[in-house]
Amino acid sequence: MSENAGKTYDVIAEKLNKSFGANHVLRDFTLSVEKGQTFVIVGPSGSGKSVFLKHLVGLITPDSGEVVVLSKKINELPPEELLALRRRIGMVFQSSALLNSLTVEENVGLGLTEHGLIGQEEVLKIVNEKLALVEMSGKNQLLPEELSGGMRKRVAVARTLALGPDMILFDEPTVGLDPLLSSNVDELILGLKKNVKCTNIVVTHDLITAFRVADRIGMFHDGKIVAIGAPEEFRRSQDKSVQEFIARNRDWRI
Amino acid sequence: MNMDDLPNSFLVFVGTKVLDGCNEAGAMLILLVQCVREAPQAMRRKHRLIIQMKRVGPDSLFIAGALALFIGMVLALHSGYSLRQFDFEEALAPIVALSMVKEMAPVITALLLSGRIGAAIAAEIGTMQVNEEIDALHTLGISPVRYLAIPRLIGCVAMLPLLTIYAGIVGMYGGALVAATYFDISYTVYFQRAFDSMEMKDVMEGLLKALLFGAIIAIVACHRGFSTRGGAEGVGRAITTCVVTSFIAIIICDYFVTRFMM
Ligand SMILES: Nc1ncnc2c1ncn2[C@@H]1O[C@H](COP(=O)(O)OP(=O)(O)O)[C@@H](O)[C@H]1O
Ligand SMILES: [Mg+2]
């Protein structure tokens, strides 16, 4: 079912609707993301981008519609299978969401240790490997509170990489970071595209990140994707909300 | 507002509260069932259980002991002076011992721990919830119930009975101090009478209560933690409601166990 004219889709969202009380956040939201692609969703804050991402890992269930992730209907999975599917999807939260009581090393190794499939030595090897990948080698014993925002983001990325995910979801990866650190995070995502080759979905209202890392960009407006295309196409889109959004965010991060 | 509406809105108020309460109780029961079902997997991580047990047990020894000692002393003072009026001081030891073992030790230990441990658990899990750490656990394929709730539940359920025994003994000793000082009852006589009057059933009642209270404290705290919303303020609210809810639940449960064991 995830085959369509020879393409494989890692995410297929069909007519998702989600309301919180009177707040109708997703309205017939439809989107497909191809395997191996880096798809960026841009849109103003508070429009429901995080809500959509949470649908992809089953943290939120839609009121109606269907989500197929890595060929599985996520809302119909029994609990154990849901846990198994989630291990294949990495999510980097807006706040990084590192466990504050654990060291960097324990945070990155958490998934591996918990699933208990490999021994401690092997866990440590993978942890060090992933920390090196995000340029955080040697920071193993630090606590999250001792790290800067950008470093926390890196550790959060390492934590999702440790499980060898097929897809990584980034929620506002550059929000709250200064321009230099933001470029750093962009580089990090570009590095992942080159070295890890998994599907990436990046949600952001930062156009610079969007244009730098995206294979395709989608404009989130009024509860759905209203325009979609490769970065250059997207920039030239005639859609009013796209033009408005670009105009409003043009001066960011110079 | 129309006068006719008054009783109506009052009914609505009460009704809503009762329904909310039922909802909460239901959610907690579900959490408890989930904990029991996933317990075997969680038991494999011994060190996590030990950390939680240590936090509930040894770390509470001093304060639980101090509390029990003075409760025992107060009990002995009160009953001692009343009994003296009837020249019936030999009943002092059984009264203090029985009320300590069956009632005071489990209840005060539980109330103390719901303030000490329950509030801490609610704060801890609540903070994790508002920081998206719980969501992060989900996305790592880790069940927060297995990772967070079960070790805490086991910690409370395992340690509360032990703490209760300890508090019971310290409380009786407090009674003995007062008995010896003010009522001329020697330690030997006091403890002899105390243990003569006590049956296995009384001890079991105290321990059963401790077990149930332990489960109440942990489940209420974990549930409040997991349902925390709204930043630091939300965490504050979670702690308050956690302590209030477990106090009420402990006292109500205490009544029914006592009634049932009569
Ligand atoms: N769990 C929730 N309960 C109620 N409302 C929510 C919840 N999560 C998000 N919302 C609401 O949904 C809307 C979209 O939020 P969000 O997805 O976080 O926006 P953003 O695009 O900035 O990520 C907001 O109005 C927010 O208040
Ligand atoms: Mg967001």
Image (cartoon, rainbow, N blue to C red):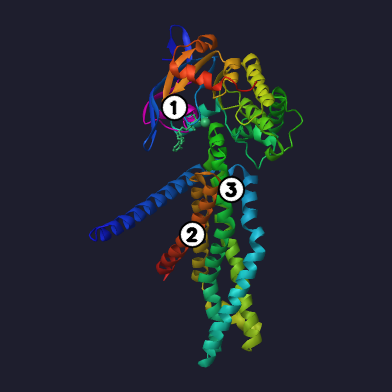
Q: Where is mark 3, residue-wise?
A: B124
Q: Amino acid at mark 3?
A: Glu
Residue that lies at the very extreme toward the left in this rendered image = B4
Check disc 1 and give the amino acid type: Ile
Please name the amino acid that badge 2 sits on.
Val
Q: Is mark 2 within 8 Å of ligand 1?
A: no
Q: Is residue B185 above or below residue B227?
A: below
Badge 1 marks a residue whose secondary structure is helix
Q: Which residues are magenta?
A: A48-75
- Which chain contains the residue that carries disc 2? B
Q: Residues within 10 Å of mark 3 (few under 14, many from 20)?
A: some
**Relative to B116, is A212 above or below?**
above
Residue that appears at 62% across and 31% down: A176
Q: Which residue is mark 2?
A: B244
Whether residue B20 appears in this view of the structure is yes
Tell me if the residue at label 3 has its CB under 8 Å from ligand 1. Answer: no
Mark 1 or 3, which is nearer the eye? 3
Q: Residue placed at 59% from the left, 33% from the top?
A: A115
Q: Are marks 2 and 3 in contact (CB under 8 Å)?
A: no
The nearer-to-camera label among 2 and 1 is 2
Q: Quadrant of the C terminus of chain A?
A: top right
Label disc, if present, on residue A82 of the rendered structure:
none
For label 2, count other residues whose C-alpha is less than 10 Å away and answer few (under 14), some (14-19) or many (20+): some
A133 or A45: nearer the viewer: A45
Q: Name the spot of residue A151 as percent of width and height, x first.
A: 69, 31
Label 1 – label 3 distance at C-alpha: 30 Å
Q: Is residue B198 visible?
A: no
